[in-house]
Amino acid sequence: MADPQGSNTRHQAYFRANLTLIGILLVIWAFVAFGCGIFLAPWLNQWRLPGTGYPLGFWFAQQGAIYVFVILIFVYVILMNRIDRRYGVDEKD
Amino acid sequence: MTVQGWTFLIVGLSFTLYIAIAIITRARSTRDFYVAAKEVHPVANGMATAADWMSAASFIGMAGIISFLGADGAVYLMGWTGGYVLLALLLAPYLRKFGRFTVPDFIGDRYEARTARLVAVVCAIFISFTYVSGQMRGVGIVFSRFLEVDIALGVVIGMALVFFYAVLGGMKGITYTQVAQYCVLIFAFLVPAIFLSLMFADTALPQLGLGRLGDDGQSLLQRLDGLSTELGFGAYTEYGGSLINIAAITAALMLGTAGLPHVIIRFYTVRKVRDARSSAGWALLFIAILYTTAPAIAVFSRTNLLESVPETAYVESPEWLKTWEDVGLIAWDDRNGDGIITYAPGAAFAGKPIYAKDPETNEPLRGEFGQRLITNDSAGDHNELYVDRDIMVLANPEIAGLPDWVTALVAAGGLAAALSTAAGLLLVISSAVSHDLLKGAIMPNISEKRELLAARIAAGGAVVIAGLIGIWPPDYVAAIVAFAFGLAASSFFPAIVMGIFSTRMNGPGAISGMIAGIVFTTAYIIWFKFYDPSSNTPENWWFGISPEGIGVIGMLINFGVAIPVAALTRAPSPAIRTLVQDIRVPGDT
């Protein structure tokens, strides 16, 4: 690289953006799994998932959390591809 | 055609397919053998990862376990899926950028220490053997139930097949065989589930069937809650165990999933960092199809059991009950002699059923209603019925009165699940021996050709040992599965995460952390599972956490030891800092 110092700070900024994204997604992950799916589940069970007979906490634990996990990974994939390009560190084909 | 005829046909066709794929995709270099030349498409890798991950336990056992645990079964559903989020965000992209062959490769290189590599090799081999023996056993059970051959012969047939495609094809052969196996297993899992959902809930999607409101304004779940409470089991949709322990087990399974070497190495096989991220997403999507269907199967079979069996006279009980009693997975001990099946909380008797036999003819002895007599001691509970949890999935087609080909399909699916997982694990064992031990420690100058030969011999040896454990399983197989996850959570996961996210973490820190985590977790599990099993009760557990969930504390201990040790010892060399900076950035730097 022509500008090693510049590329170094750019890489650090890139990694910070990555860490922020990871942090946000993992908070959602933990809240859905351990919050809605476990510790809040008995309380959430007083409601039903709208339009169904699923107790809400039970639905999170046995269905909803899994859907959220899949969505979180694809959100990470899409946003990271964008961040890769913004910082010019994406892989060339 | 009979069920057996169908089974021979469908299982035979699926095996032919696996062998054909193995021949087409055989490995020619160590790069082919260990990481499929790093050319696998992310969607194909997602499917292969899903097949690799979903074992005989997921396919045959999980729905049954959940149907008995009810809400508490969520530990498996969330625990065995949530780890993929950790893999995708914290491990897969960086390990792909690092780009070598095995997990011990990363630990050894990153921490500049042969000791670290050796600790990793020993853990990888131990975890994989623990797991693979269960798969071989699963193959044997499916063979003996559906093709009426001896369990041992079933295991040998499974061994021969895995031997053929794992030894010949290495990672490359395994990957494409796993793609085919995923298709077989998911189809086999969904077909009976859809039929059951139509029967019980009037809708084709099992995921919706559970919560769908019927004409009476009640969902199946509400009906099941009512049935369960009536019989004294407690509501199906409410947690029965302590929430702290449920959370700990869930977390240990998630962290363990993210630290299992046979899952991690799948992300070495794709072309780019970007592909490693997306293939984790595809893998979880493909896994989620089975994991969101399993709780529905659990509820359908539980409802069916509770509606058709308790308080029924044995002579009028459903036919499948007797079929599975003959197989030895159901037993009824009519202790009050009234001819009516009492089903209530508690064990029907101590341990697994021991059926009484005529000492001369060796024929089973039967009671006055035609039931098989058992010789177990009473466990002192009111319950009279023993139901093995494994039959829930296997018996479904019969319970639902589905055509014979569906039963055959379920057999092929169970075999696909067991074989695909076994192959992935055998590859980890083989690469740990040939790449990490032989090339990494004993003979660094070994030629590529001889390393490939060594990898094949190691894979072959591992197949034979795994098969032997499958034929003569030690009693503690079920107990040591907790070990595999506990070890992965307390050793690999923290060591890899710190290696990526901290430039300051060094060899002494990582090694002392891993050893502290492993020693604590192992000691805790051995104490409660082997040394003093009678003390394995919530009052004696530390922090209220059972041995299945203790990997979480092991991981915290690992971090708690590694970080101060690293702070007090020398920082890693500049070369390592450069390595860490490099794996954090996808493109060339």
Image: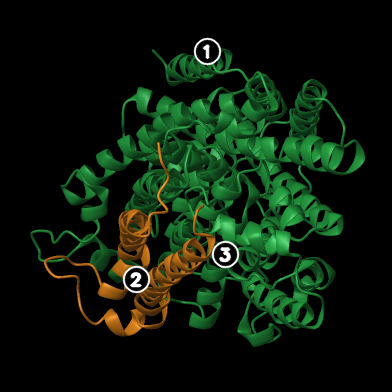
* Residue of label 1: B20
Q: Is residue B212 above or below residue A56?
A: above
Subunit under mark 2: B
User: In x, y percent, where is residue B401?
Assistant: 31, 34
Colour that chain A carries in the picture: orange
Choose mark 1 or mark 2, whichever is in front: 1
> Which residue occupies the extreme left position in the image?
B215
| Res B142 seen here | no
A78 with respect to B353 (left or right):
left
User: In the depicted view, which residue is nearer to us: A14 or B507?
Assistant: A14
Are tags 3 and 2 found on a single chain? yes
Q: CA distance from mark 3 to mark 1?
A: 36 Å
Picture quarter with the N terminus of chain B: top left
Q: Is residue B274 above or below residue B544?
A: above
User: In the depicted view, which residue is nearer to us: B10 or B114?
Assistant: B114
Q: How is the image coloured?
A: by chain
Q: Residue at x 39, y 33 (%)?
A: B188
Q: Residue at x 80, y 27 (%)?
A: B451
Chain in green colour: B
Q: Amino acid at mark 3?
A: Leu
Q: Residue at x 48, y 16 (%)?
A: B17
Tell me, for residue B237, which label it has, or none.
2
Q: Secondary structure at mark 3?
A: helix
Q: Amino acid at mark 1?
A: Ala
Please report whichever mark, 1 or 2, sits nearer to the chain's N-terminal start.
1
Q: Secondary structure at mark 2?
A: loop
Residues under numbered marks 3 and 2 in contact, where contact means CB atoms less than 8 Å apart: no
Q: CA distance from mark 3 to mark 2?
A: 26 Å
Quadrant in the rendering for residue B165: top right
